[in-house]
Amino acid sequence: QGVIFSIRYHENLQRLCSVSDDRSIRMWQLSFLNGTLKEPGPEDWRCVKSDLLLMLYGHSARVWDVVLTTNYFASVGEDAICCIWNYAGNILHKFKGHKGRNIWGLATSENEKFVLTGGGDGSIRMWEIHQEKTNKTVQRIVTVPQSHIPNPDYFPRIVKMLNFDLILIMMN
């Protein structure tokens, strides 16, 4: 239903997830006919079975991106909210902090303890993740010096946490 904005695959879980124009997040469990494959090749993808596990709605507007980790997945969208979900389909956290509309960039730390978001407001936010549902929010704000932004209309489009001290930001 609607335009698909992002597709992500988690190799170890063999799960595929898409986010869409219709505000949905859909997750499939994949089964390869050759069994569990660490790195499926083109031939393996031709013979894959997919079972829809989850069809979720947690955003009030279009969903732009999703990232899958071992224990949770995160989604961001036009409503400027970052939702953290468990694999049962429950929302663990709803992080709000970007001003205005849209979160365009989404990344997780390698240890999966932090989620980073890049918003249309030009800020990068880092959220600490707890596996249980909690009201506790730890948020760090990273600002990009204006001297590093060639155009005031630019905003973070892709965010990648390289390590705890180094964040790669791609602007539009």
Image (cartoon, helix red, strand yellow):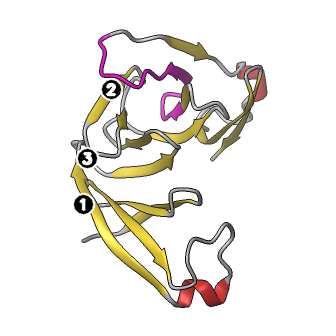
**What's the magenta region?**
117-135
Which is more toward the observer, 95 or 68?
A: 68
Disc 3 residue type (three-letter): Ala
Q: Earlier in the sequence, mark 1 or mark 2?
A: 1
Of tags 3 and 2, the one toward the viewer is 2
Residue 161 visible somewhere in the drawing: yes
User: At label 1, which amino acid type do we have?
Assistant: Asp
Q: Nearer the viewer, residue 170 or 172?
A: 170
Spot occupied by residue 112 in the image (x, y as percentages of width and height): 58, 32
**Residue under the point 57% across and 71% down:** 36
Q: Are marks 1 and 2 in contact (CB under 8 Å)?
A: no
**Residue holding disc 1:** 22
Q: Nearer the viewer, mark 1 or mark 2?
A: 2
The amino acid on which the numbered mark 2 sits, given as a three-letter code, is His
Tell me the quarter of the picture where residue 169 sits: top right
* Residue pictured at 31% horizontal, 15% vertical: 134
Q: Seen in the image, is 162 located left or right of residue 16? A: right
Q: Which mark is residue 61?
A: 3
Which percent across, then down, holds residue 4? 39, 67
Is residue 171 or residue 68 the one in the foreground? 68
Q: Earlier in the sequence, mark 1 or mark 3?
A: 1
- Numbered marks: total: 3
The N terminus lies in quadrant: bottom left
Q: Quadrant of residue 103?
A: top left
Q: Residues within 10 Å of mark 3 (few under 14, many from 20)?
A: many
The residue at which mark 2 appears reads as 93
Would residue 123 be seen by someone viewing this image from the given angle?
no
